[in-house]
Amino acid sequence: MSNWKYEKLSKLCYRIGDGLHGTPEYSARSDVYFINGNNLKNGKIEITENTKKVTSEELLKNFIQLDNNSLLLSINGTLGSMAFFKNEKVMLGKSAAYLNFKTEINKFYYYYFQLPSVQEHFHNVATGSTIKNLSLKSIQDFEVPVPEFNVWKNISKILSSLDAKIEINNRINSELEAMAKTLYDYWFVQFDFPHVTSSGVEKPYKSSGGKMVWNAELKREIPEGWEVKPISKVIEVKDGTHDSPKPKTTGYPLITSKNLKVEGLDFENANLISEEDYLSVNKRSQVETGDILFSMIGNIGTIYKIEEKEINFAIKNVALYKTSQKEEYKNFIYMFLKSIDMDRYMKNVISGSIQKFIGLSSLRNTPFFINETYIEKYEIRTKSIFAQLKNLKLENQELASLRDWLLPMLMNGQVS
């Protein structure tokens, strides 16, 4: 990097700005999403159920020209998260800045801005004691290295190819999980599991007249002879620390509900805690490979099954299902927690008027139906699916580690 010239970002862009400073006119029937910094994640604009929509008139009134060379950057609250613009129908809010680069070198700066030193720079120049704000002027005046065309092109290609492979694996995993869910729903929601009738013919249980009985806890019919009990009678259900360990500059990540994502654990934005606090929390809630994490506050019900081999983090506002104690049930329990039965149960036990949450006792008392024969058959039938899911998840962890290791080396010229 020492051989590269430096330029202000304003010289590399034809425009740098941010979104609307104010409240737009919302419309639930619109298809135009109102995007802020918290919608920028891992190079993509992330739309959630909480993302509001604005009218087409509002978009026209506050129109900002974006193109394939634009890079979106979060500048308020959470700093430094980024996304590329892919012609989505969006309108920007004030916490989302846009950098309209003159060339596709925006792909290079997407990775350059991820360097710890650059992220630290963003935080150092940001103003505000409670909520940090990165001014447009500080972005415009930020001097960045400008490598030769073939250099930044190759660096971008190497790093983006790793991200592309991770994305492919994520899509495959989504399809694999959908296959496992289809079978789960067919067997344990519709109750059309393969059943051998008295005549010796295998038929779908409920559709072929299998006897069903009403269950008051589940508030629906289940096959005769199936048992229903609180899930805590099958596996141990815990929660994380109730304390607020003081954040440290070095230490162990504290994973909270906001760090729990469907695609993985957000270690990058997790607070670090001391070894003493880490050991204290893990006396209460030791996370092991195979266990399932379940968010209890905020986006309640976000689920992540631990496949990591080395687990060095603690949890807060997150429930812990100790499926490592019940290996033969772990995939079935994972799908149960994502099922319509769990959704129905949660609607009746979620508390809080402003900040919604679900209590540990409610999770422990979740009605859980059991038929060991069919749970075992489901585990056998889906074993290869979940094995592939695990392998691809572990491969993604290795690819991400390789990318993060290569990033500073490519940027400082250690690797060409």
Image (cartoon, rainbow, N blue to C red):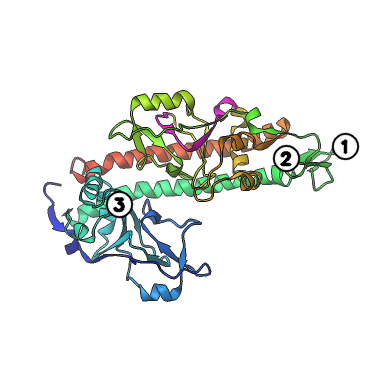
Q: Which of the two discs, 1 and 2, labels the residue nearer the N terminus?
A: 1
Q: What residue is pinned by disc 3?
A: 157
Estimate how packed mark 2 is, as few (under 14), some (14 to 19) or many (20 or more) residues with alpha carbons within 10 Å. Answer: some
> Residues under labels 1 and 3: Cα distance?
62 Å
Q: Secondary structure at mark 2?
A: loop
Residue identified by numbered label 1: 198
- The residue labelled by disc 2 is 217
Q: Residue 159: x and y, percent?
A: 31, 48
Element at label 1: loop
Could you tell me the amino acid type at mark 1? Ser
Which of the pair 210/37 is nearer the observer?
37
Could you tell me which residue is drawn at 43 percent across and 44 percent down? 258
* Vertical placement of residue 411 versus 37, above or below: above
Q: Position of residue 75 (x, y in %)?
A: 29, 55
Q: Which residues are magenta?
A: 310-326
Callout 2 amino acid? Glu
Circle nearer the N terminus (3, 2) = 3
Q: Residues within 10 Å of mark 3 (few under 14, many from 20)?
A: some
Q: State which quadrant residue 108 falls in.
A: bottom left
Mark number, residue 242: none
